[in-house]
Amino acid sequence: MRMYVAVVGTGARAGEWATRFLASGLDVVATDPAVPSTVEACWPIAERLGLFPGASIDRLRVSDDPALLGAATVVQVVGDARAPDGAALVATDRTAFAHRPIHLLPLVELTGAPDELVAFYESIGMTPRQQDSHPLERWRLASGLVELTNGDPDAMLATMRALRATGQPVGVALAAHEARRFASGAVTPWSPGAVVDAPLRLYRTAVEPDWVDYNGHMTEAAYLTAAGWASDALFRYIGDDEAYREAGHSFYTVETHIHYLLEVDVHEPIEFTTQLLGVDAKRVHLVHEMHHGDTGATLASVEQMLVHVDMHAGRSAPILPDVAAALTAIAAAHAPLPVPARVGSVMALPPARH
C-alpha cells in the first residue's frame, strides 16, 4: 500500500483532519465511523481551497485494525485517543495542534515535534509554527481569522484570497498552499539527453469552483489562470523553480492571445498540451492548447510571448544556461510539429459591404 495517514480518534476534529489529508491527495484510514459523513460535509470548501493532484473522498476507509493503523506513514491522534503500537511518526493535539476548521485554516502549532512532522505538514500546504513563534502571527493564521469572520468558512476563504498578495501571514500561507499544490503535480525536470514529448503534456486539473461564473461555466479570465498554471508546469520542467526565482530570475508574459472555443463546467477535467514555437536569448514563444480531459475536445488555445527578466535589475536579461539548454532541446523536438492555425491570428472586423 502506498503512503497513507491514519486518523485515530473521534469527533469533528477527526473528520476535519481526514478532510485535510484527503484534499492533499493522500490515502486516509480513520477509526471513527462518523468521519466519512464529516468529510462529505467539509469537502465543498476543501475543493474551493484547492485539491492536490489525486485528491478524492474515495481514498478514505474506516478501520480499527491495529496493524493497519500502526503501519501508517503518519498517525494523527485526536483528543484522548491512544496511538497504535509500532507507529513510526505520531502527532497528537499536544504536539501538533490545529485550529478548527482544520481543513481550511493553515496553522498547525508544534510542541516538541520532530523535523519529519514539520516537513510533512509543509508538504500538504499547512503552516507549522513552534510555540515560541510570535503569538500575533499565530493568531492571524488561525483564531484571528475565525473571530474576524464569525467562523463562516466562505468568509474565511474570501479573506484569505483577498490577503494573498498583501504579505499578511494568512495570505502568504494561502500562496504557499497554492504553490505546494501545483508543485506536487509537477513532472520530472528535463535533463540532458531526455526524450522530449512533442507536444508537452505537463498540466492536468479539474475546473475549480472559483473559475466558474454566473453563466454556469468557466469564466474567460479563468482560461488565462489555468494557462498560467500550465506555464508554471513548463517552468518547473525547464528548471525555473523556487531556487531560480529566489536568485532573481523569472519569465514575464508580455503578450497573450486567447481563442475561446468550447465551454466547460465546474469539476470537469482539463489538460494542456504545450508547444514551443520559438526561443531566443531572452524570449519564449509558445502556445498552450486546452483540452477536455475526457473527450479530448479542444476548449481553447492560448498563445503567449514570454521574456526572461532579471528581477533585481528590473529589466530583461539572457536566459541562464541550464534553462536555455532545456528550452533549446524542447524547441528542437517541437520544430517538426505543424503550427496551429490560430497562432498569429489578427483580430479585426471584416470590411464593410457597400
Image (tube, helix red, strand yellow):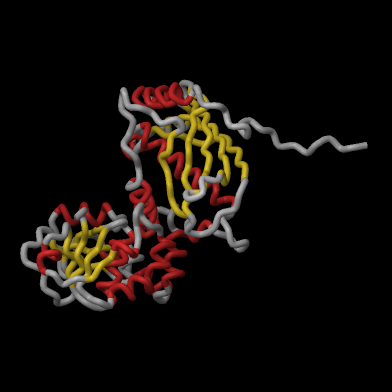
Residue under the point 49% across and 29% down: 276
Q: Of residues 3 and 224, which is closer to you in this image?
A: 3
Q: How many numbered discs?
A: 0
Up-down relation of residue 101 to residue 312 (above or below): below
Q: Of residues 144 and 345, which is closer to you in this image?
A: 345
Residue 303 drawn at (x, y percent)? 56, 36
The residue furthest left is 85
Please say whether residue 140 is visible from this viewpoint: no
Up-down relation of residue 185 to residue 19 (above or below): above
Q: Quadrant where the C terminus lies?
A: top right
Residue 256 drawn at (x, y percent)? 58, 38
Residue under the point 39% across and 75% down: 151
Residue under the point 45% across and 54% down: 206
Please say whether residue 291 is visible from this viewpoint: yes
Q: Quadrant where the N terminus lies?
A: bottom left
219 sits left or right of 294 in the view: right
Residue 343 drawn at (x, y percent)? 61, 32
Up-down relation of residue 241 to residue 269 (above or below): above
The residue furthest front is 295
Choose top left, top right, bottom left or bottom right for residue 97. bottom left
Q: Of residues 269 and 45, which is closer to you in this image?
A: 269
Residue 104 drawn at (x, y percent)? 36, 65
106 sits left or right of 93 in the view: right
